[in-house]
Amino acid sequence: MSLARPEYVSDLIVYLLNGLGIDYVPLNPGATTRGIHESMVTYGGNQAPELITCCHEELAVAMAEGYYLATGKPLATLVHNIVGLQHASKAIYEAWLNSVPMIIIGGTGPLDASHRRPWIDWIHTAQVQSQIIRDYVKWDDQPQGAASVAESVIRAYQIAMTEPRGPVYLCFDVELQESRLPDNFPIPDLSRFQPPAPPAGNPAAISQGARALLEAERPVLIVEGLGRSPGGSEALQTLAELLGIPVIEQGNAYNLPNHHPLNVTGANAEVLKDADLVVTAGVKDIEATLTRAVVAPGTAPSGLPRAASGYGRAFESLIPEGAKLMQIGLHDYGVRAWSSSYGKLLPADVHLLGNEVLVLKDLADQCQGSIDAGGRKRASDRAAWAKDVHNSIQQRTKTDVKERWWDQTPTSTARLASEIWEAIKEEDWVLVHGSLSGWEKRLWKVEDESRWVAGGGGTGTGMGVAMGAALAFRGTNKVCVSIQNDGDLLYTAGSLWTASHHDIPMLIVMFNNRSYYQDVGHQTAITQMRERSLETVGVGVDLVGPDTDFATLAKSFNVYGVGPIHDAAEISAALKKGLDVVKNQRKPALVDTVVQPR
């Protein structure tokens, strides 16, 4: 949509957001963003971009994260001064951890103290409002003057979209927002302010990495998030197939088809035990894949089983001593002093600082031009071995579901994953959020990144991420599926209002274990260590008494709801009813399944 020449500074902000391709602005309204809000609705016609009303700022930011994960395009959000920013801060931190770009726009009371209303403007005005989030945004600004506003918005977009990507924050004084633009104000040509191209790897380091790959007998690729970059999966597949390298995925993002014979995720220990070269691409916390926790055998002095979770566990390496490590990625550019989000420092024999997709392509090109007959023979042998490992994983998974998990009560995670797959496998589906302890990756057929958004983060952001991703498919026939944890939804139950009000079609399947179960392991570990009874482990953790009826909660927001379902045999019929609402009415539907803890 082409907009008329802006009259006010707030019109200018909307004009620039429109020109930068910002489709939506999720918000919870407030007085300090009223100028921008009015401009979006009146000047922009609520189309360029469109406002999405949220019941909490955390949801607004999480929606921006989900939308980016689904489309690769950033959104802007509006947050009302100090209090809105405080609400939003948790989701902003999640966006920072996940390298998700977005433009967070805040307002502040009049910086000219003589213009402030008594009390309310004083408590809503900060000297440097961004201070509370400055350690986990890429950049922030609080410009003065119309020309500075234009430059600030454009720079914010450039910085957010420059790799490694991440959130940025802008703060605009209310009086500045509402002021008229000067006569003959120059409107910038946005086509000349695009983000820079991502950096490739150093040529000498690329050559060193290619030699290491060609010389290795048992190389292994560990990858994370490559499907979120254009061409990432293809670059990975080309290199892996050329050299017959087994691939292990970390995290819940898409990288490689789960039925590809080189995908050996789930057999990490078996694959890594003989590795002589480990190549990581896009992996921030490398230690998480290269080690495993050691649980002491036997029982505690009390006679109880020793705890398998909690602090104090020892960790052992999964790779042999002397194995080489090659790191690929841009995470070093994102290291900040405040958050230790970069993981343990590990020695690297080859450290390729560059865009993972470009580096993998360059490595494949160099290896293709240098591989000899012996290298091709080693690649063929490795590929055959990896295929055997892959097939054994597949067979073991099918056997476990059928013989161990299918008839358990309450419903097992594996059974729920199977039931969802049976319901959606003939549909044009996409997983927009959530996980079932990895069973969905093992049991569903995931062929490409278009099926797999599956973003997520800390408790409270799940529904926001799901709604943002599903919003991207609102005008299509996609069947969006969100696996939603009960404790997560209870943080932001008002998210169901947004899904209903904006007709965001999505099948919400509740993973309702009636517990903040993550803490059960920790409580068990500390109780065992102290030689005390386990009878009270669930206190402060269980979500029972009352048992939340999520189907009734959904209905209160005019969302179709069914459940709670205790009998696994009833899940299939319930999912079909929910799918019918999503497909034919293009509205959200919620199916509440009561399940085992994990």
Image (cartoon, grey):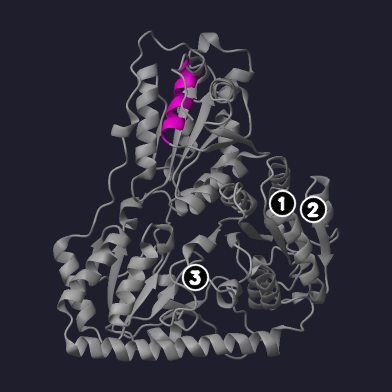
Residue at image coords 69%, 63%: 516
Q: Nearer the viewer, mark 3 or mark 2?
A: 3
Residue at image coords 68%, 41%: 502
Residue at image coords 69%, 47%: 492
Q: Is residue 86 above or below residue 307?
A: above
Q: Are marks 2 and 1 in contact (CB under 8 Å)?
A: yes
Task: Look at the numbered disc 3 and give the secondary structure of its residue.
Answer: loop
Which numbered disc flags the more N-terminal residue, 1 or 3?
3
**Which label is found at residue 447?**
3
Quarter of the image where one finds residue 399: bottom right
Q: Mark 3 packing: few (<14 Cα in 10 Å), some, or many (20+)?
A: some
Residue 21 in picture, x, y percent from top left? 44, 37
Which numbered disc flags the more N-terminal residue, 3 or 2?
3
What's the amino acid at mark 2?
Tyr
Q: Which residues are magenta?
A: 8-20
Camera-nearest residue between 5 and 146: 5
* CA separation in Å, label 3 and label 2: 30 Å
Which numbered disc flags the more N-terminal residue, 2 or 1?
2
Which of the image's four quarters has the C terminus?
Answer: bottom right
Q: Is residue 123 above or below residue 64?
A: above
Q: Which residue is mark 2?
A: 560
User: Can residue 189 be seen at all in this image of the molecule?
Assistant: yes
Q: Are marks 1 and 3 in contact (CB under 8 Å)?
A: no
Q: Which residue is mark 1?
A: 588
Residue 95 inside the magenta-drawn segment: no
Task: Look at the numbered disc 1 and give the secondary structure of its residue.
Answer: loop
Residue 96 in picture, x, y percent from top left? 45, 49
Quarter of the image where one finds residue 230: bottom left
* CA separation in Å, label 2 and label 1: 7 Å
* CA separation in Å, label 1 and label 3: 25 Å
Q: Mark 1 packing: few (<14 Cα in 10 Å), some, or many (20+)?
A: many
